[in-house]
Image (spheres, helix red, strand yellow):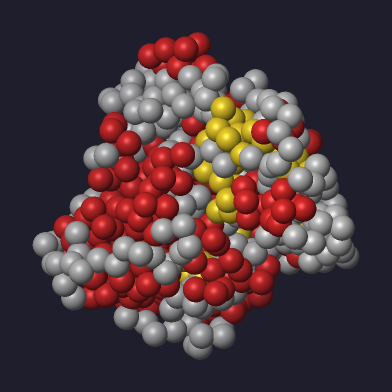
Amino acid sequence: MKKIFYSLMAVAAVLFASSCEDRLDIPQKGVVSQEDFYITDADAQSALTSAYYTMAGYYSQNWPEIGWNDSPYLALWSYASDDMYAAGQNKTDNTSQQELNSFRFDNNNPMVSGAYKSYYQAIYPCNLVIDNFDGQKATSDTKKKCVAEARVLRAYSYLMLALGWGNPPLIDHCILASERPSNCESQEFLLNWVAEECDKALPFLDARTSLDDKNSTVKVTKAFAYGIKGKALLSMKKWTEAKAALANVVNDTLYQLLPSNRMEDLFHVEGDGNYETVFEFNLVYDASVSGYDARGCRNLPYLWNWRNDKMLGPDGPGTLYVNQGWGECVPSKKFIDLLIANDGINSARRKAWVKTYDEVLYEMPYSTDDSCSTKEMKEGDRNRGITASDGLYGMVGYFPWKRNIRETDLAPGWGMIKQNFPLMRVPEVYLMYAEACAMLGETTGKGLEVLNKIQTRAQSQTVSATLSMNAVKTEKYLECWLECTRFQDLIRWGDAATELADNGKYLPSYCDAMFTLGENKHRGYVDESDAAWCLNLYGSKVGFHTGKNELFPFPFAETQINPNITQNPGWE
């Protein structure tokens, strides 16, 4: 019987029929057999390119599984945190995301199942590279480097699986479709495996060659491997080892923070390949190449941009705002309150991450600006502002700006982008290093230095005199907002039960008195009249549940097909 390799849509899910019928063994014309393909350096590079391509596609967009909208990677780690509200048109919109945001989801939630499957789909092509070019088959430096890069890509997916599901199946080679892998030994076992995989890869990886080496940001480098290793060790509370691994990036002068005045370019085309990036997927639109919609984050502009059907947004010449959006990702009151209390309203980070309603109304360009040349005139202009009688759902008067899509970010087609898709930035590495230092009791030194670098770049009014875990926690929350680290951090710190207990209990709306109360000037206000609807409707189901929500459930579709998977505690 021919061996059929498993393209893991889900662990143990049979996606390709494993039939032994003779009619399936008819040779296909124009198709290169596996035995004839995995031979040359060019073959190795082609297989590695496929691994990058597949991983980028499944991290940014898994259409059938995630509901045709969200990025599995962004959805899972953003909604399951106190970073933001899962908003949208109203409380009946965005239901799967709202369930995750309020921790009332089950093992059928598409955000959870889509992300889980996406990680394994990304692992499969990495296994192909490693199976076919490692060991005795690694007969050239090119093949060794291709194997190393695939090893680190695979390690990152397993790092996310370990942090999300604890002890998922470890599949480190291509398997038969009939196999039913069981859980790995433990979360610690898998995290340690991730660190060891990075060690195996490091001798063969490239390093950044200059501050302007943009190519190094879109391929696996030594820095990315050290970042992954450090994060795995940090998650095991191996502070000394984590510090040593992360120091390789912290001490590398070719990795630096962008200046304050360039913070707004992060997460946009203008910031692609900058020297603050450790690794990002390269999204290059080419009209001559088909299939861009499979990796172009379809619908992401609508998800992350403001709700345009409920407001008249900036539409004048030179605006960076794209007037199309569903307003599903909105900063929480908790985040806003801490950002302003810690940084101050005028900090560079506040201005780069979120906009006030007054800034939206009076500092951004509108088509009516020629006839409304003064602020007083703009205050009475009915051609701008939140016009809906029920306001903007899930809003407290601050508009997300950090990951809003600009006109320059858009690719041709329906809701696709062309800016790169970042997985790790220098600030995350700095703050992981500072955490390791703080946990080792170091109150001064390099840990404090990198913490201060982030605070100073942010132009924060708070600059720490000594290093402490409280300072690290605050900076990580503020600096890495909407970068998929918050839930992982809270679990590692043991703070999730406290910090996430109120998720879903407060969901207000933000209104403009000109349109809701008939006032003659714009005045934004928070409407809390129905803010507790979720708590009132779902009661004890709302909020983080200790002994359950530390890990996500293995998807129902997986456990039904594979009896060898043991479900996580609280999800049985």
x, y percentage for residue 232? 32, 55
Q: Is residue 419 visible?
A: yes
Q: How many numbered marks are there?
A: 0
> Residue at (42%, 29%) from the top-left corner?
503
Up-down: is 33 above or below 523?
Answer: below
Q: Quadrant of the N terminus?
A: top right
Give left or right: position of 282 versus 99: right
385 vs 37, nearest the viewer: 385
> Residue at (33%, 47%) from the top-left corner?
489
Quadrant housing residue 267: bottom right
x, y percentage for residue 567? 38, 24
Give left or right: position of 505 versus 213: left
Quadrant housing residue 196: bottom left
Q: Quadrant of the C terminus?
A: top left
x, y percentage for residue 119? 52, 45
Give left or right: position of 144 versus 547: right
The furthest residue to the left: 441
Up-down: is 513 above or below 422?
Answer: above
x, y percentage for residue 385? 73, 43
> Residue at (72%, 48%) from the top-left corner?
379
> Residue at (23%, 75%) from the top-left corner?
446
Q: Is residue 65 visible?
A: no
Quadrant housing residue 512: top right
241 vs 259, nearest the viewer: 259
204 vs 132, nearest the viewer: 204
